[in-house]
Image (tube, rainbow, N blue to C red):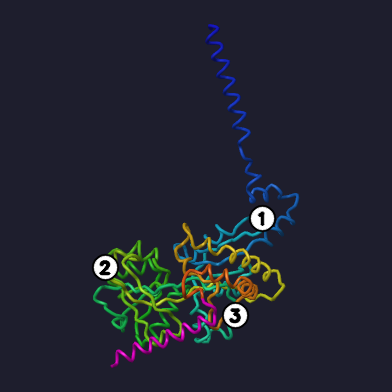
């Protein structure tokens, strides 16, 4: 080997050794950055201390079914609030609003859950549970879930479904409750059947049922991505007087569902509020303190949720909005009282930036407007 070639080899080996040393120096020990690995590495030497610390700092949230908005909200909460050491958010895939109410009441490991506001009223009105709202507190109203009624274009209005077969999803969720309330109050005697949405859509396509209902935050991933058949459309749901105590008027647009609504057209419908709720824990109990810890972190970062890449429905969330008939979790109300100005500024719209008193005034004015519209129509 020539002297020149020898020098080249020595330089290459030296450079390789130097690069390897730098690479090793830059490597990160996963055990130093992962709280999960830290816990596992300590297993055996400090099992009880580790378990107690992890359990004390973990808040569980019962969400909804895969693909729904509840699950997305749970994932967003974990993404923003979870710092592992002081607070861990553990979303649980649920089975809908009705099952969520039962899980909050009875499952030992559930601290919070997302439920629909009309679910508790339905359970009380039907005699399934007395004073059920006294067993719950709410952290905040979340967003509005719109009622989607998918049917052949021959069905022009909800009343056309009288005597027809309509799927209202499974009885663990909230769609069947909202559907039952709406059909009963409007006097529409449809044959309601409980079929999971994917199966219901196949039956609708095959002509085995006449319509299907999904009460989900728009744009519903299921409705927008699955229902492409030109034979179907979204049936309007009028904001009739029997619905005005518990629901809100809203609309679906081409931007929400370009395959179901023509550009420039809107479909009127109603919406029911989704609520972040908790069991009415005794003050100063460990579970009460855990929910309190969650509230302090959540309310302080509410503005983060209303920015991309988080679910667009976060823009509807108002932590100051009151829910009639519900009792707010005391630390949540105390936080709002202490941060009244900043909390109102963080809310996303004119409806949500009002105090509870102003909100009541707005609702009264809105009801007067509805009555005026009705009288004008009669004239």
**Residue 172 drawn at (x, y percent):** 48, 73
**Comes first in the chain, label 3 or label 2:** 2
Q: Residue at x 59, y 69 (%)?
A: 112
Q: Residue at x 59, y 61 (%)?
A: 90
Is 290 in the magenta?
Answer: no
Label 3 vs label 1: CA separation? 31 Å
Q: Give the image location of residue 160, x and y in percent.
A: 28, 82
Instruction: Count residues near mark 2 (Cα–Cα under 10 Å), then give few for <14, some for 14-19, many for 20+.
Output: some
Furthest residue toward top: 2
**In the rendered structure, which segment of residues is drawn in magenta?**
354-379
Q: Which residue is mark 1?
A: 85
Q: Nearer the viewer, residue 117 or 43?
A: 117
Element carrying mark 3: loop
Secondary element at image label 2 = loop
Instruction: Provide the major secondary structure of the magenta segment.
Output: helix
In this figure, which residue is indicated by the disc labeled 2?
262
Is tag 3's residue or tag 1's residue first in the polypeptide sequence?
1
Q: What residue lies at 62% left-to-right and 65% top-to-bottom?
A: 294
Residue 187, compared with residue 321, is above or below; it is below
Q: Is residue 47 left or right of residue 260?
A: right
Numbered label attached to residue 327 = 3
């Amino acid at each position: 080997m020539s002297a020149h070639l020898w020098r080249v080899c020595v330089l290459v080996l030296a450079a390789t050794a130097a690069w390897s040393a730098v690479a090793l120096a830059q490597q990160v020990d996963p055990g130093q950055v992962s709280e999960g690995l830290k816990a596992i590495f300590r297993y055996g030497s400090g099992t009880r201390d580790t378990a107690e610390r992890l359990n004390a700092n973990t808040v569980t949230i019962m969400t909804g079914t895969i693909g729904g908005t509840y699950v997305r909200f749970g994932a967003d909460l974990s993404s923003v609030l979870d710092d592992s050491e002081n607070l861990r958010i553990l979303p649980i895939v649920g089975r809908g609003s009705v099952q969520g109410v039962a899980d909050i009441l009875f499952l030992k490991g559930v601290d919070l859950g997302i439920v629909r506001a009309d679910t508790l009223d339905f359970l009380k009105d039907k005699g399934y549970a007395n004073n059920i709202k006294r067993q719950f507190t709410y952290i905040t109203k979340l967003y509005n879930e719109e009622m989607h009624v998918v049917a052949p274009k021959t069905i022009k209005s909800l009343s056309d479904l009288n005597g027809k077969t309509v799927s209202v999803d499974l009885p663990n969720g909230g769609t069947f409750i909202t559907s039952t309330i709406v059909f009963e109050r409007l006097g529409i005697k449809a044959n309601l059947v409980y079929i999971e949405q994917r199966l219901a859509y196949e039956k609708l396509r095959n002509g085995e049922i006449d319509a299907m209902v999904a009460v989900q935050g728009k744009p519903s991933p299921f409705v927008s991505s699955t229902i492409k058949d030109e034979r179907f459309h979204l049936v309007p749901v009028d904001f009739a007087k029997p619905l005005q105590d518990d629901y809100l008027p809203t609309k679906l647009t081409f931007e929400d569902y370009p395959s179901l609504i023509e550009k420039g057209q809107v479909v009127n419908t109603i919406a029911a509020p989704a609520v972040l709720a908790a069991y009415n824990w005794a003050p100063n109990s460990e579970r009460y303190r855990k929910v309190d810890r969650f509230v302090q972190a959540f309310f302080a970062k509410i503005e983060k949720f209303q920015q991309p890449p988080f679910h667009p429905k976060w823009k509807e969330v108002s932590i100051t909005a009151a829910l009639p008939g519900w009792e707010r979790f005391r630390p949540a109300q105390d936080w709002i009282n202490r941060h009244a100005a900043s909390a109102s500024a963080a809310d996303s719209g004119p409806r949500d930036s009002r105090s509870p008193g102003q909100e009541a005034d707005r609702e009264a004015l809105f009801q007067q407007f509805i009555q005026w519209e009705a009288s004008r129509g009669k004239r």
